[in-house]
Image (cartoon, rainbow, N blue to C red):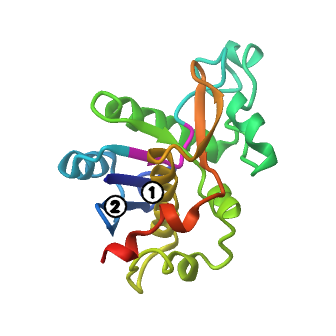
């Protein structure tokens, strides 16, 4: 099982957390430029990629600009964000920071989808569903973690976990396939699914 989680930043000058699950072990990196993120992925050749960023636009929109005529046709959210509200809240895609993140996420995902399975998820909601209160300490119950790990890399680890649940068929999917979906883990069989330490 090879899964990459990407806690994508809205701007290349800000750190993007990367987590790579290779069989039973997690490996962490912090990258910045799109080309470096893509090069890392192409080198690792994962079976699945999970990204924390909107990877599509709301129906009816060609962009997220408030000055474009499409702003009268499409809203601020996709159906995926609306459906998952009982589990966790997300910001409107038209907020400035979210707009930048969405544009970057779409750009990277379009390139990756040529060769890989690419899914979208949301770390804070994953954490809430799994009941992790202290993210670092809770993750050490299932994985060996370095001491100097960043918050972005920890969030990327949550995305990997969502990917593991997806591979086991223990996931929820929200949204419209034609518009874009978000996956989240089901809160069940956590110890059975995240049993990597038993293989060390």
Say if 37 sits above or below 120 in the image.
below
Q: CA distance from mark 1 to mark 2?
A: 7 Å
Helix, strand or loop status at disc 2: strand
The reply to whether dot 1 and dot 2 touch (C-beta < 8 Å) is: yes
**Which tag, 1 or 2, sits closer to the chain's start?**
2
Residue farthest along the bottom direction in this orientation: 147
Classify mark 1: residues with Cα within 10 Å, few (<14), some (14-19) or many (20+). Answer: many
Say if 65 sits above or below 155 in the image.
above
Classify mark 2: residues with Cα within 10 Å, few (<14), some (14-19) or many (20+). Answer: many
Please tell me whether residue 52 belongs to the stretch shown in magenta.
yes
Q: Going 55% across and 38% down the picture, which residue do you hit?
A: 102
Say if 135 sits above or below 32 in the image.
below
Which residue bears the numbered disc 2?
Answer: 21
Left or right side of 102 for 70: right
Give the magenta range. Answer: 49-54
Helix, strand or loop status at disc 1: helix
Say if 84 sits above or below 5 in the image.
above
Q: Quadrant of residue 135?
A: bottom right
From the image, which quarter does the C terminus lie in?
A: bottom left
Please tell me whether residue 169 belongs to the stretch shown in magenta.
no
Q: Going 81% across and 47% down the picture, which residue do you hit?
A: 86
């Amino acid at each position: 099982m090879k899964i990459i989680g990407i806690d994508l930043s809205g701007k290349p000058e800000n750190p993007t957390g990367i987590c790579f699950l290779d069989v039973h072990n997690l490996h962490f990196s912090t990258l910045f430029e799109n080309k470096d993120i893509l090069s890392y992925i192409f080198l690792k050749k994962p079976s699945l990629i999970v990204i924390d960023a909107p990877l599509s636009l709301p129906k009816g929109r060609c962009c997220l600009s408030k000055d474009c005529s499409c702003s009268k046709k499409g809203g601020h959210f996709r159906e995926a964000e609306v459906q998952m509200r009982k589990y966790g809240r997300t910001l409107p895609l038209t907020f400035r920071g979210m707009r930048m993140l969405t544009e970057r996420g779409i750009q990277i995902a379009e390139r990756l989808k040529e060769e890989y399975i690419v899914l979208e998820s949301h770390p804070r909601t994953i954490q809430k569903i799994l009941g992790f209160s202290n993210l670092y300490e809770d993750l050490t119950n299932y994985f060996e973690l370095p001491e100097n790990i960043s918050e972005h890399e920890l969030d990327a680890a949550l995305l990997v976990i969502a990917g593991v649940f997806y591979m086991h068929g223990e996931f929820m999917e929200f949204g419209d396939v034609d518009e874009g979906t978000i996956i989240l883990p089901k809160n069940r069989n956590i110890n059975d699914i995240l049993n990597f330490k038993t293989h060390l």
